[in-house]
Image (cartoon, rainbow, N blue to C red):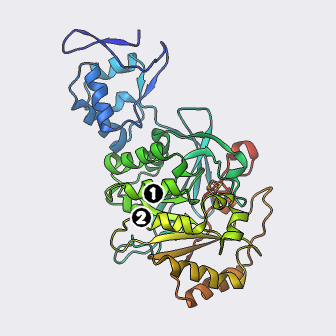
Amino acid sequence: MLGAVVSAKTNQLVRLDTNGLAEGSTRALFGQDAEALAACMAAIGEPRWRGRQLAEGLYRQRVTELGAITTLPALLRGRMQAEGWRVGRPRIGQVFVSQDGTERYLVEGVAGPETVETVWMPEGDGGETGDGSEEEGRSWDRATICVSSQVGCAVNCQFCLTAKLGLQRNLTAGEIAGQVVAVLDRQGVELGKDRLNLVFMGMGEPLLNYDPWMAAVRLLVEEVGISPQRMTVSTSGIVPGIERLAEEPPEVRPKLAISLNAPNDAVRSEVMPVNRKWPIEAVVDAVRQVRLRSRERITFEYVLLGGVTDRPEHVAEVARLVRRTGLPVKVNLIAWNPGPGIPYAMPQPEGVEAFKRALVAEGVPVYLRRPRGRDIFAACGQLKRTVETGAMPHSAP
Ligand code: SF4
């Protein structure tokens, strides 16, 4: 019987809150915060502080088996396993390694059969350059993990392969944070020693899965130990989500990137239909509510689609738009990565450089994101469960 255990301390029969856990099934611990883990321990007659031992094992030691949390008594570990409790962290199912060192993973979730995509870029892609997070003496040569927040996406950006999937389901907090911990584990990252950035730019629109996504951020900050100033969330411009983000305390709020991708509302509504609901000015108004930290900048991501968003006349429009915000803004240019069935053309390489130079001449801080892992379909806009398509994936550029 899964719903009751005998407390080793009291010899009393204690009923577990199994949330309808069926006999023979299991229950994941990964994804629960310290308070929930303490409550779990209390529910089986253990002191609440054992929840802290669980949290240490799950999020700092990165264990994948309950039996490996040796700070817990062996009897308790055995009892919990017998009752169906397990770590339940998402696991890396398949690995694709690029010539440039980028690795793309198909990560198996725990709340459904679908896989999601997570990308490891050992030297980043330059996306954080100039956003206020650099340290003295270091620039962009840092590892970055690109994290997914949904299976598929409902936003329907016309240049994005993930959009082709539609929204299949939201990921849980454990599935979002679990992508990060699984990659940290695989790469042997020592937080505090190794430099690491997280970008929530994988499959899905994080701000349309706000509560689980933010719960994952809290876990990553408070339990895993990653600074929110090393995290960037990219949104297509979901105004209610940006307004909620603005309410988050600075101790846990990631930096914000807006997928702008067009010089004006007319073009943006074509390439990003979400603009018809929340046009550029509404998005910028919401962004103004975010209380920026010292040196922090808002990033405008800008995908250059050949002949659509990279015309010479667009430069002045983008510069005007940036100036009108009155915000500390930087622009990340991304040369569009092609995907099957997407009716756009790559920009000419010389056109990308010319666009960048012209924006710089307008006084706009601008950086060119280096395409990473194109050969394994890991670059921006390419993510989409490749296991099925044979080509693949994602996302929010
Ligand atoms: S670019 Fe991002 S928000 Fe737009 S469809 Fe793709 S995953 Fe969704």
Mark 1 within 8 Å of ligand 1, using the beta carbon: no
Q: Residues within 10 Å of mark 1 (few under 14, many from 20)?
A: some
Kindly identify the residue that appears in the image at 67 percent across and 80 percent down: 352
Nearest the viewer among 187 and 367 is 367
Q: Looking at the picture, tell me which residue is in the foreground, 375 or 134.
A: 134
Q: Are marks 2 and 1 in contact (CB under 8 Å)?
A: yes
Residue type (three-letter) at the residue carrying disc 1: Glu
- Mark found first going from the N terminus, 2 or 1: 1
Res 231 quadrant in image? bottom left
From the image, tell me which residue sits under label 1: 243
Residue at image point 46% right, 48% down: 180
Q: Is residue 322 above or below residue 127?
A: below
**Residue 314 image offset from top left, x and y in percent:** 68, 81
In the displayed structure, does residue 330 sit left or right of residue 42?
A: right
> Is label 2's Cβ within 8 Å of ligand 1?
no
Quarter of the image with the C terminus is: bottom right
**Residue position marked by numbered label 2 in the rendering:** 289
Residue at 39 percent of width and 16 percent of height: 82
Q: Quadrant of residue 367?
A: bottom right
Q: Residue at x 66, y 70 (%)?
A: 265
Amino acid found under the numbered disc labelled 2: Gln
Note whether 278 is above or below 15 in the view shown.
below
- Residue 200 screen position, x and y as percent: 51, 55
Is 53 on the left or on the right of 281, as rendered? Answer: left
Q: Tag 1's secondary structure?
A: helix
Ligand 1 in which quarter: bottom right
Local packing at callout 2 (Cα closer than 10 Å; few below 14, some 14-19, many 20+) is: some
Q: Quadrant of the N terminus?
A: top left
Picture coordinates of residue 393 (x, y %)? 67, 52
From where the camera sits, is residue 366 visible?
no
Q: Position of residue 321 (x, y in %)?
A: 57, 78
Q: CA distance from mark 2 to mark 1?
A: 7 Å
